[in-house]
Amino acid sequence: MYYTGFADEAASDLDGQIKATTDLGWKNIETRKLFNGNLASITDAEFEEVCEKLQKAKVSFNCFGSGIANWAKPITEAPDSSYDEMKKAIPRMQKLGCKMVRMMSFAVPKELREKDFAAEVIKRLKVIVKMAEDGGILCVHENCMNWGGLSYEHTLKLMEGIKSPNFKLVFDTGNPVFSDDVRGSQPYRKQSAWDFYNAVREHVAYIHIKDGKLDKEGKTVYTFPGEGDGDVKKVLTDMFKRGYDGGISIEPHMVAIYHDKGPTKEEMMFSNYVEYGRRIMKMVDDIKKELA
């Protein structure tokens, strides 16, 4: 087992991301934002700088938190940008020894959520997964603001339609808290993190730790792990009982919410990320003592 996280929530620059990682005693980063882009879009010169800094710090990218088929890529638009991102990412991932890419399954406009996009989503994802197979990369699909995240049944349809050893799931504990369970007819209730995980756990190869709860107005408030409704401890306990020995990736969202474009304070980001990391390590230690 190893720890990692979206260190761009600790610092906007790679130096700060590396420092937060090493301050925690960790060796891995789930890379997302680099310079003014990501691993697939930065220039060759910027990529070489990344390689040098990682090597010097003895820190690795365990996963590329890509924008492939994500919440900004509607299913109603052509998939070319996602195909291009995957194509560009693979050789850089291979050079870095990064074996895993986080992906999604295209955004569905709210007014079209009841339309059946299964065949089109699966067709597109098969193209992406085939590239991953050829490049020796594991695709992990996140239950986020995408077609597969509309319910656990949607995710299971993906697994049934894309039968590949290079296609697994990354389960995010926090996303169900504020996501509608798009089954049946409206009004939809919110998803249950435990129910979602329990339904898909056979396919989970990686985990994102996020937690939160809805306030009285229905707005999501992000919290430290275990303080929200993400069933973090319950999910981790079950994973360890089942022999999980992979990565545990933190995505606090408490200070730096990645989707927001407003200003953030670097010092608050850094301290929150490190504190979040320490808390998840303590939770894991407590769970393992309970299971011993």
Image (cartoon, rainbow, N blue to C red):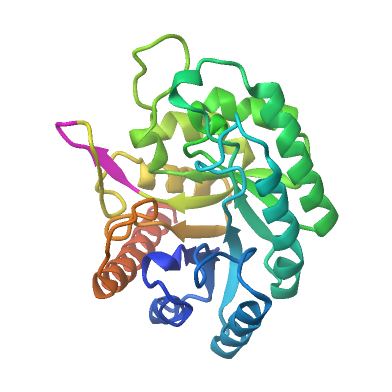
Q: Is residue 39 visible?
A: yes
Residue that extends furthest to the bottom in the rendered view of this protein: 56
Give the image quarter of residue 195: top left
Any magenta on residue 213? yes
Vertical placement of residue 21 versus 240, above or below: below
For the point 43% across and 67% down, which residue is it?
8
Q: What residue is rendered at 56% in x and 64% in y?
A: 38
128 is within the stretch colored magenta: no
Q: In this view of the protein, which residue sits in the foreground, 103 or 68?
A: 68
Seen in the picture, residue 36 relative to 150 is either above or below; the reply is below
* Residue 12 position in % (x across, y down): 40, 72
Q: Quadrant of residue 115?
A: top right
Residue at position x 50%, y 19% in the image? 112
Q: Furthest-right residue in view? A: 134
List the single residue furthest toward the top.
185
Q: Is 280 on the left-hand or right-hand side of 29?
A: left
Q: Quadrant of the C terminus?
A: bottom left
Left of 79 or right of it: where is 178? left
Q: Is residue 165 visible?
A: no
Q: Is residue 58 above or below residue 222?
A: below
User: Residue 158 appears at what percent x and percent y?
Assistant: 66, 30
Task: State the quadrant of the N terminus.
Answer: bottom right
Question: Where in the figure is residue 277, as x and y percent of width and height?
Answer: 36, 66
Range shown magenta: 211-217
Note whether 139 is above or below 267 in the view shown: above
Query: Residue at the left extreme?
Result: 216
Give the percent coordinates (x, y) of residue 169: 60, 43
The foreground one among 56 and 256 is 256
Side (left or right) of 29 relative to 16:
right
| Front in this rendered view, residue 228 or 142 | 142
Count of numbered tags: 0
